[in-house]
Each structure stands twice: as structure tokens, then as C-alpha cells.
Amino acid sequence: MLKAPRTLTFKCAKCAKAVQVSLQKVSACSHITPYSGVCSCGEVKLHAIGQPEAVQAYLASNGLWTHHH
């Protein structure tokens, strides 16, 4: 099984600078891998890998998402 990278880099949607997102709490859950970060301009960047429903819920949460089994 592949390990998720600890950080990913994206272009900020607001200022086009590079913004690095970090892997959030690593768990045994395989259906979502959430990332978040803040650009130097203050724009929050959320990203996730996994099941589409879980990813959509995470991205729509504005960073206030929690995951429970």
C-alpha cells in the first residue's frame, strides 16, 4: 500500500503563488486523506484524496470537517 505524501504544493486560486498543504491527522481510515494549508496571502487551501462523497464533504466544510466511524 502506498503512503500518502506528507505535503503537496498547489497554485493559490487568489494570488497564484505556491501554497503548500500538509497531511492532516493520519488514521487507519482509507476512504479519505485530508490536507490543508494557508497561503502567504491568507487564502485557505483544502485538498483531499479518497472517496468522492467524503472529499466533497471535506472541501465544503471550510476546514471545520471532522471524521467519525
Image (spheres, rainbow, N blue to C red):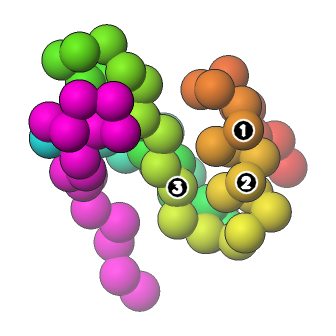
Q: Is residue 60 in view? A: yes
Asked whether, in this view, residue 10 is left or right of residue 54, the answer is left
Q: Secondary structure at mark 3?
A: strand
Q: Residue at x 35, y 81 (%)?
A: 2
Residue 59 rendering spot, x and y as whole percentages: 64, 43
| Upstream in sequence: badge 3 or badge 2 | 3
Most extreme residue toward the front is 15
In the image shown, does 6 or 38 lie closer to the viewer? Answer: 38
Residue, disc 2: 56
Residue, disc 1: 60
65 to 34, vertically: above or below: above
59 to 62, vertically: above or below: below
Residue 31 rendering spot, x and y as whole percentages: 67, 68
User: Majority secondary structure of the magenta segment?
Assistant: loop
Q: Secondary structure at mark 2?
A: helix
Residue 33 rendering spot, x and y as whole percentages: 52, 57
Give the Cα separation between the discs numbered 3 and 1.
11 Å
Most extreme residue toward the bottom is 1
In the image shown, does 56 or 5 lie closer to the viewer? Answer: 56
Asked whether, in this view, residue 30 is left or right of residue 44, the answer is right
Callout 3 amino acid: Ala
Callout 1 amino acid: Ala
Q: Residue at x 42, y 25 (%)?
A: 44
Q: Which residues are magenta?
A: 1-17
Residue, disc 3: 48
